[in-house]
Image: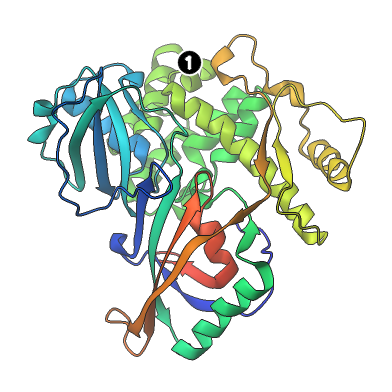
Amino acid sequence: MHFCTLYDGKKIKGRIKAKYEDFIVEEMPHRHEVLEIGKDYEFDETSEGKFLHCVLIKKGYDTFEAVSILRKKLRIKKEDRITFAGLKDKHAYTSQLIGMYKVQKEAVENLELKDIEVVPIRYGGKVFLGGLWGNRFTITVRDIEQDEKEVREIIDGFFEKTGGYFPNYYGEQRFGTKREITHLFGKYIVLRKFEEGVLFYLTAFKKKEHDERMRKARELIEKGNYEEALETIPRKYEHERIMLRTLIKTGDFRLAFLSLPKKFQRFVINSYQSYLFNRLLEKVVKAGYFDEKLKLPIVGYDYSKPVFREKWHDMLDEMLEEEGIKPEMFYFSKEKHLTTTTRYRKAFGKVHDFEFVKFEKDEMFEGKNKLTIRFALRKSTYATTFLRELLDYVVEGES
C-alpha cells in the first residue's frame, strides 16, 4: 500500500530488508540517547521501582510477538505486566525499552530465546506507550545499479527541494507486513460486522499464502471446518488460533474478536484510523498543499465539522462518505476499550541527523552496489515512509 510522495525527483532503485541487519532500529528515549545494539550495559544497582527496565533486542519478531514469548517464558499472565514505549518492526534488527512488573533481574539474566535478548538495566516506574523521543535507523539499501555520484545527487536533490520534510504517512507495519489487511479488519469492526470481519481476517489472501499448512487451514475455515483448521494452523499464528478456539466453543463471532488480546483489538481499530489519515494526507499532498505546521485529524467518535473550514475539511467529508463511515461509529457502548477519541497528527515529518555512511560493492548481489545511511526520526514517524521519498525500492521477498 503506497501513497504518493512529496518529492517528485529521481529515485534510487534498490532493495531493502534483504536481511535483518540491513534495517537496524534503535530506540531513542531522549533526543541524544540511543539504546545501542551491541552496547555493554551496566545495571544500576541503586535504582528502585516496581518495574524492571530492560533493553529488548530482537529480530524476526514484532513487539507484540516478542512480549508474548516473554510472558510465557516468565509465566506472566496479565498483558499489562509488560509495558513498552513503542512498536518495532518485525523485519528488522531492533532495540527498545520495556518494563516488567515485579520481575527481578535474576529472572531474565539467564533467559535463552532465539533471536531475542533481554538486558536488564535498572528498576523504575511503568514504561508508557509513546514515552520516547524517536528512533535511530541504520539502513542498508542493496541491489543498486546507479553509481555513487548519481546516488549522492538524488539525496542532495531531495534535501534541497524539501528541506528534509516528507508526508507523515503511517508506515506499512501499521497495516500488516505480510498481508496488508489489518485496516480492513478494523473497518469491519467499526461497522459492527463482526462475522464478516473475523472470517475475512482468517481467510484473506489464501492464494498468496506462502505457508502451505496455513493456506490449507484458510480453505478449511472457508468451508466451516473450524476444528480441523485449528489442528492444521501452525502455533505461531496465535491470533487465528485464539479466534478459532472461541468460535468452536461459542459460535459467536463478536466473542471471537473480543477473545483477542485487548492491545491487538485496539490496534485493529487504530489501523483503520491510520488508513483514513493516510488517505486524507495523500489528498492534501496531491493538491500541492504543504505546511510544516499542519496537523490533520485521526478521526474518532467526537470529531465534528468545524465552523471555519479549510480545503482539507471538504476532502475529509468526501472521504468519510466514500467509506460509509460516520465519526460516532468509533464509539463502542459495550466494548468501551475500543472507543477512540479524535487526535491530531503532524501532516509532515522531518528527517534528523541524516548521514551518508558508505557506498560500496554489494556482496549479496553480484555486480551491484549497496548504500548505508543513518538518520533519526521522531516517534510515530516511519522510516519506510521517509525512504519512499528517496528510493524506488522493493522489499526482499516481494516480487
Measuring 18% from the left and 35% from the top, which residue is drawn there?
A: 120
Measuring 66% from the left and 58% from the top, which residue is drawn there?
A: 3
Q: In screen coordinates, is 104 left or right of 187?
A: left
Q: In screen coordinates, is 153 left or right of 9?
A: left
Can you tell which quarter of the image residue 61 is in? top left
Asked if 40 appears above or below 67 in the picture, the reply is below
To which residue does mark 1 refer? 251
Asked if 310 appears above or below 398 in the picture, the reply is above
Asked if 45 appears above or below 171 in the picture, the reply is above
Front residue of 73/220: it is 73
Q: Residue furthest top?
A: 334
Identify the secondary structure beneath mark 1.
loop
Can you tell which quarter of the image residue 100 is in? top left
Q: What residue type is labelled 1?
A: Gly
Q: Specify the color scheme.
A: rainbow
Tell me residue 388's x, y (percent): 57, 65
Q: In screen coordinates, is 249 left or right of 102?
A: right
Can you tell which quarter of the image residue 98 is in? top left
Measuring 47% from the left and 20% from the top, which residue is drawn there?
A: 256
Tell me residue 97's x, y (percent): 32, 37
Residue 232: tell me if it is visible: no
Measuring 36% from the left and 53% from the top, which residue is drawn there?
A: 25
Tell me residue 291's x, y (percent): 76, 54
Where does the N terminus fall, quadrant-wise? bottom right
Q: How crowded is mark 1: few (under 14 residues within 10 Å), some or many (20 or more)?
A: few
Residue 239: tell me if it is visible: yes
Tell me residue 58's x, y (percent): 26, 47
Front residue of 102/332: it is 102
The number of numbered discs placed on residues in the rendered structure image is 1
